[in-house]
Image (cartoon, rainbow, N blue to C red):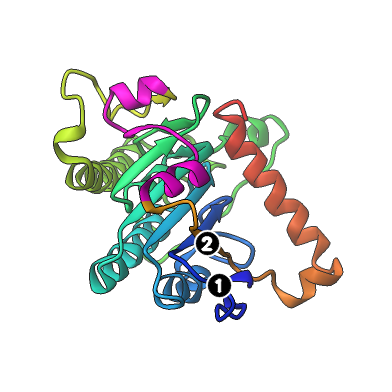
Amino acid sequence: MAGLLSLSRWRGPVVSVIRLDGMIAAGQGRLNDQTLAPVIEAAFRRGKPRAVALAINSPGGSPAQSSLIAARIRRLADKHEVPVHAFVEDLAASGGYWLATAADDIWLDPNSIVGSIGVIYAGFGFDGLIERYGIERRVHTAGERKSLLDPFRPENPDDVARLRDWQAQIHATFIDQVRTRRGERLNTDEELFDGSIRIGTKAVDAGLADGIDHLVPKMKALYGEKLRFIPYGPRRPFLRRFGLNMMQDALAVAEERALRARYGV
């Protein structure tokens, strides 16, 4: 981790840069609280930083992991009294935008995609297919709701209603996070929570971001030209450094590319 290099030869104010790049999900090779906890802790603690910058490029993912990561950043920012600035690269969509709201302000490239404040579930229905080929589906459960949204059975309206209720709960939590963190900066004349995205200046006009700027020039403008940037990021798992676990890596890449494709990137 570059941030663990000796700081003794560096003089001047320091900004810790935490890279949040990829899909948010539990497991190795993903952005999640377990993986990022030591990274975030070190970024706030080492070198007495004047500020922490979040370099974000994420299509989102797990709501729970997004919430955990953002909450950890805020706890440490308040504890160490260190300001946090978010800089969006290609996109901070859905859970990626949740991470951005952990910052005190959010800065974009003119082409950055942000928003998608919503919750999605996607699946397939194979009941017609197996019926066509005379395949019998056999499922035995203890608990009548155990086989929820079984893709090999016709869609059950009660299951769909239950799913929508769960989505509504998560969506409400997401909205509360955005409203709490962005406050009066949000443009109340626009519909911000319908899952739509905004790009660059239109995101700024909506109050989802504070302006168009890039990490290095903005931080130097705020903290001086002699500013030192110390990068922090999760280590790659040991086996992956030698090209092992290739199948798992390939599946992870495919899944993330599919998620990014929703936003055209």
Disc 1 residue type? Trp
Image coordinates for residue 37, horizontal then vertical, percent: 45, 73
Measured along the vertical axis of the image, is residue 80 above or below residue 229? Answer: below
Magenta part of the protein: which range?
Answer: 201-222
Image coordinates for residue 141, horizontal then vertical, percent: 44, 63
Identify the residue shown where x is 82% and y is 61%.
246
Q: Mark number for residue 228?
A: 2
Quarter of the image that includes the N terminus: bottom right
Image coordinates for residue 171, horizontal then vertical, percent: 28, 42
Query: Do residues under tags 1 and 2 come within 8 Å of each other at their CB atoms?
Result: yes
Residue 140 visible, this orientation: no
Quarter of the image that includes the C terminus: top right
In magenta segment, residue 207: yes
Image coordinates for residue 168, horizontal then vertical, percent: 25, 41
Q: Which residue has dot 1 on it?
A: 10
Q: Secondary structure at mark 1?
A: loop
Identify the residue shown where x is 16% and y is 40%.
183
Identify the residue shown where x is 63% and y is 70%.
2
The answer to which of marks 1 and 2 sits earlier in the sequence is 1
